[in-house]
Amino acid sequence: MQEYIRRRVLEISAYVIETSATVRGAAKVFGVSKSTVHKDLTERLPRINPQMAKQVRFVLDINKAERHLRGGDATRKKYRGE
């Protein structure tokens, strides 16, 4: 794995753990696609740092469980004109 990819994986992982960011949010902050962020966090990170991967997986699982609520809020705001 190239060094810049390794660094990016660790930086994105630390950001997600600190802020509980979604994959889309992290992608926007780091200027990469959400597919890249997802691959970094689910495939590359466990090979680099398994302990950090467990923490990231915990955050991703919480975000996945809450996503239907966020979608409902976004739709509600859209139609209220907020």
Image: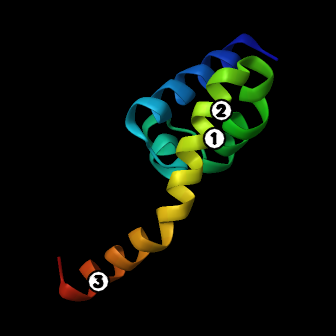
The residue tagged with tag 2: helix, strand or loop?
A: helix
The residue tagged with tag 3: helix, strand or loop?
A: helix
* Residue 1 percent across, percent down from the top left: 82, 17
- Residue at image mark 3: 76
- Residue at image mark 2: 54
The residues tagged by marks 1 and 2 sit, at their Cα atoms, a distance apart of 5 Å
Q: Are marks 1 and 2 in contact (CB under 8 Å)?
A: yes
Q: Is residue 47 left or right of residue 60?
A: right
The residues tagged by marks 1 and 3 sit, at their Cα atoms, a distance apart of 29 Å
Query: At 79% from the left edge and 36% from the top edge, which residue is drawn?
Result: 43
- Residue at image mark 1: 57
Q: Mark 1, residues whose alpha carbon is within 10 Å: few (<14), some, or many (≥20)?
A: some
Query: At 68% from the left edge and 49% from the top edge, which residue is drawn?
Result: 35
* Residue 41 percent across, percent down from the top left: 67, 36
Q: Which amino acid is tagged 3?
A: Arg
- Camera-side mark, 1 or 3: 1
Query: At 67% from the left edge and 30% from the top edge, which residue is drawn?
Result: 53
